[in-house]
Amino acid sequence: MTEGYKEKEYKQPVKRYVQTMELKDNPELIRRYRAAHQRENFWPEIKAGIREVGILEMEVYMIGTRLVLIVEAPLDFDWDTAMARLATLPRQQEWEDYVAQFQKCTSGETSDEKWKMMERTFYLYED
């Protein structure tokens, strides 16, 4: 996709978190992972939980088996508190166990344990 992706505009400043994970190198599992994340298949309880902990936007990008997760949240968002709470919400661990079959991870891990936080190494800032 060379046209890019339109970003949301918020009425407040936001901060961004970027994480990564690997999928199992199996075309059928990758197809099923994509299908699980299509709007009509994505579990409503998971979307509600993401919103409930204060996340404004969440996107997953993929190339090959590499996933990149981008999260936008308010400036006062506390990652550790939100992830601990998210892990306790309805169907969250069930979802994590379901998608674990597609991911290179250990069974029973929470979302926060699976996804690895990435370090920003470049920022085109204004002078």
Image (tube, rainbow, N blue to C red):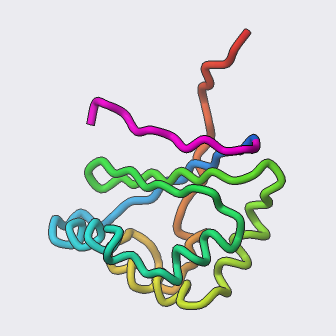
Quadrant of the image for the C terminus?
Answer: top right
The dominant secondary structure in magenta is loop
Q: For the point 39% across and 84% down, which residue is it?
A: 98
Quadrant of the image for the N terminus?
Answer: top left
Q: For the point 68% across and 74% down, which residue is it?
A: 52
Q: For the point 64% across and 81% down, which residue is it?
A: 87
Pick whichever, 106 or 98, lies toward us.
98
In the rendering, at what x and y percent does residue 102 appear? 32, 73
Pick whichever, 63 or 78, lies toward us.
78
Relative to 16, is 100 above or below? below
Q: Residue furthest right?
A: 76
In the rendering, at what x and y percent does residue 29 appear? 22, 72
Q: Tag count in the figure?
A: 0
100 falls in the magenta region: no
In the rendering, at what x and y percent does residue 105 appear? 44, 72
The answer to which image quadrant residue 30 occupies is bottom left
Give the magenta-colored segment's residue range: 1-12
In the rendering, at what x and y percent does residue 115 appear? 53, 62
